[in-house]
Image (tube, helix red, strand yellow):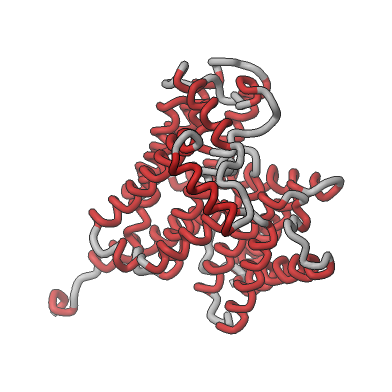
């Protein structure tokens, strides 16, 4: 009992550090707090993961593909490191490995005994402080709060809202009126960030969550839904640069200006077009694990598309391994498709994947968002594992009739 209590508060402290990671996009001493929080989190996670694996020396057979493709994805970065071996390529390879190991660790956390009240209230406090902050500033748009940049703030807030919805699913004392109130505040803050990619994440989450019973009705529908999402990601990445020169593109530009006040063509179309041309010249293994668009196209911007930045670094081979890792996670979640938390995670998973089409946060750049997004995915794997173990126990327990 005492050990469980200690572990509960340690998990709560872990959640506090996750919140602190958001300060990485801040300035001054707060930026250092965020940076060190991320480092502590992913390194501690990696250490505990290997400690647990070395003790148990056992992998659940239904999770084996998650581990295989995680290893292959990390290996792709390790091999790519030697394409242009330097300090940055070594650093990026280590960073990617730590993030993936951190994800694997999050799937083993004992969420059943975590201090949910602390986590629930901590997220509420963070959201309410920022809403009050926004109101004091006169509800100015865009608003970036402690993150100093509206786009990461929107992504961080959308991811935090997703985490809040998972916590409330497991916290029996969560009140409906409080949940609705906090959700509205968070959505207002996402609106204040003026981040359209964050709204894409939220919209795709709600669509997937609403249609979840249909999506999970049969395995073939479930798997095809994920494949369709991947095809949409590929289509957006390859077609968006070409729309600039088409009538459809001009129509979409007019619609975007009329309804959002923003351009449909944000400049990404030029960046992506240039990157696709560069990638086509070394498509298989890329240009090195630390390759940046600025090295080929000038400027200082990232790809604003995780998949293109990844392909630039590790080529088609590494990208395929990552896609297979994502699919193996999605496939595993089906085990617990009727679990409320897994339903929430599955819907958020789709939102996160679409978010990465326009931002870079999975394994680099905005790591403050990365640690929350991988935590969300890890929670889903954890609850799927519990359900899988329960099924196995049910199959191994003899019936009353057999005993008699």
Residue 293, how many percent across, how many down? 61, 26
Residue 402, how many percent across, how many down? 13, 74
Q: Nearer the viewer, residue 269 or 98?
A: 269
Q: Nearer the viewer, residue 219 or 110?
A: 219
Q: Is residue 49 left or right of residue 301?
A: left
What is the total number of numbered labels drawn onto the structure image?
Answer: 0
Task: Report if residue 53 is visible in the image.
Answer: yes
Q: Give the vertical position of 277 relative to 345 (above or below).
A: above
Q: Residue at x 80, y 44 (%)?
A: 32
Quadrant of residue 219 in the image?
bottom left
Query: Residue reaching furthest right?
Result: 28
Quadrant assignment for the C terminus: bottom left
Task: Report if residue 46 is visible in the image.
Answer: no
Residue 283, how many percent across, how many down? 43, 21
Q: Nearer the viewer, residue 240 or 256?
A: 256
Residue 357, how many percent across, how many down? 51, 43
Q: Nearer the viewer, residue 126 or 190?
A: 190
Q: Residue at x 68, y 57 (%)?
A: 193
Q: Residue at x 57, y 31 (%)?
A: 270
Q: Residue at x 40, y 37 (%)?
A: 69
Quadrant assignment for the N terminus: bottom right
Q: Give the vertical position of 316 relative to 336 (above or below).
A: above
Q: Give the vertical position of 380 relative to 306 (above or below).
A: below
């Amino acid at each position: 009992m005492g050990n469980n209590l200690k572990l509960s508060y340690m998990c709560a402290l872990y959640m506090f550090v996750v919140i602190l990671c958001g300060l990485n996009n801040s300035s001054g001493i707060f930026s250092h707090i965020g940076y060190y929080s991320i480092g502590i989190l992913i390194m501690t996670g990696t250490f505990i993961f290997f400690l647990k694996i070395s003790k148990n020396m056992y992998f659940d057979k239904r999770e084996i593909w998650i581990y295989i493709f995680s290893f292959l994805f990390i290996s792709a970065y390790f091999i790519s490191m030697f394409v242009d071996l330097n300090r940055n390529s070594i650093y990026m390879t280590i960073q990617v490995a730590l993030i993936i190991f951190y994800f694997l660790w999050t799937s083993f956390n004992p969420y059943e005994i975590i201090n949910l009240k602390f986590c629930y209230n901590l997220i509420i406090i963070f959201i309410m402080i920022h809403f009050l902050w926004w109101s004091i500033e006169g509800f100015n748009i865009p608003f970036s709060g402690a993150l100093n940049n509206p786009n990461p703030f929107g992504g961080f807030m959308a991811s935090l809202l997703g985490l809040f919805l998972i916590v409330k699913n497991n916290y029996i004392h969560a009140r409906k009126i409080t949940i609705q109130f906090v959700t509205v505040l968070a959505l207002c803050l996402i609106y204040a960030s003026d981040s359209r990619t964050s709204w894409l994440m939220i919209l795709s989450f709600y669509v997937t969550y609403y249609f979840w019973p249909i999506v999970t009705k049969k395995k073939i529908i479930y798997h095809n839904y994920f494949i369709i999402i991947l095809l949409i990601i590929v289509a957006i990445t390859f077609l968006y640069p070409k729309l600039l020169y088409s009538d459809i593109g001009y129509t979409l530009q007019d619609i975007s200006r009329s309804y959002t006040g923003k351009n449909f063509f944000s400049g990404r179309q030029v960046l992506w077009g240039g990157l696709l041309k560069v990638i086509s010249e070394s498509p298989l293994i890329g240009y090195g694990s630390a390759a940046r668009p600025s090295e080929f196209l000038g400027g200082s911007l990232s790809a604003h598309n995780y998949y293109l930045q990844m392909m630039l670094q590790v080529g088609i081979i590494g990208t395929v391994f990552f896609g297979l890792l994502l699919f193996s996670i999605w496939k595993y979640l089906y085990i617990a498709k009727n679990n409320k938390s897994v339903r929430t995670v599955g819907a958020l998973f789709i939102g996160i994947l679409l978010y990465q089409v326009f931002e870079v946060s999975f394994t680099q750049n905005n790591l403050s968002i990365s640690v929350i997004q991988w935590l969300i995915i890890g929670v889903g794997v954890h609850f799927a594992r519990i359900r899988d173990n329960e099924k196995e126990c049910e199959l191994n327990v003899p019936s009353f009739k057999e005993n008699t």
